[in-house]
Amino acid sequence: MATNFKFIPVIDISPLLAKCNDPKMAEDPGVSEVVRQLDQACREAGFFYVKGHGIPDSIIKEVKSVAHKFFELPYEEKLKIKMTAATGFRGYQRIGENITKGVPDMHEAIDCYREVKEGMYGELGKPMEGRNQWPSNPPNYTELMEEYISLCTDLSRKIMRGIALALGGSPDEFEGDRAGDAFWVMRIIGYPGAPTSNGHGPRNDIGCGAHTDYGLLTLVNQDDEITALQANGFQLLQFLEHLYATLGTC
């Protein structure tokens, strides 16, 4: 992956979405152009903005609003869905409980994973067995987040169809027997701001340390006024109608 790119790619994926379930999608000129841009962005940057993604702006805004309402609740209320091994490590993490390279991260979060039934993956899958913990407050949290997860997983599937074509494969290369049993993770993250310390000095008092995402594709929906997210040294701004996608290090 090159590191000398000058700008963050912005890709309108609406032509890809329009033809994504068409058996002849690879022959469509609009799809071919999106595939070309995805190929270039993934090779040269490893991350890009997507527009024309089809997720209503009203839902994107509401997700952020509901997340803020939850993190503003007293700790006692948030701890009702505390993450434990018994929950398959789903639920609420307090500030500093998430560790990156030995340093506590200055954020709190709700971790949600694809739900894994008992015995679904034998002994290997036992640590991840469990159901997601949804807070009762705000009252519309569960319904909203389940809809949002469904929209994001479907969008990810469609983007991966374009990436599969960019790699010279068939659109369904990452589906079926090869990778059709996809596992997803959603983290709702709240950052308290600078006054909170992790005890490792001011230079380490950051929301989340540098890391490589372990998934194949990550979608990021950050607050409009927040510009602290960085990837490969780039400051990532949030465009209201865009989502940020990454395949690389952030």
Image: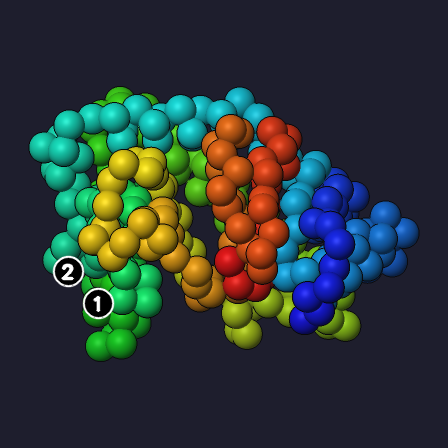
Q: Quadrant of residue 44?
A: bottom right
Residue 164 visible within the image:
no
Q: Residue at 21% of width from left, 58% of height from top?
A: 88
* Quadrant containing the N terminus in the rendered view: bottom right
CA separation in Å, label 1 and label 2: 7 Å
- Asked whether 176 or 33 is in front, the reply is 33
Question: In the rendering, which numbered label is found on residue 229?
Answer: none
**In the displayed structure, does residue 39 sit left or right of residue 210?**
right
Whether residues under marks 1 and 2 lie with C-beta atoms below 8 angstroms apart, the answer is yes
Q: Which residue is mark 1?
A: 127
Q: Residue at 84% of width from left, 56% of height from top?
A: 32
Q: Is residue 228 above or below residue 1?
A: above
**In the displayed structure, does residue 34 sit left or right of residue 238?**
right
Q: Amino acid at mark 2?
A: Ala
Q: Amino acid at mark 1?
A: Pro
Residue 240, percent across and down? 60, 29
Q: Which residue is mark 2?
A: 85
Instruction: Count neighbours of disc 2 (C-alpha within 10 A) and say few if under 14, some if 14 to 19, many if 20 or more.
Output: few
Q: Secondary structure at mark 1?
A: helix
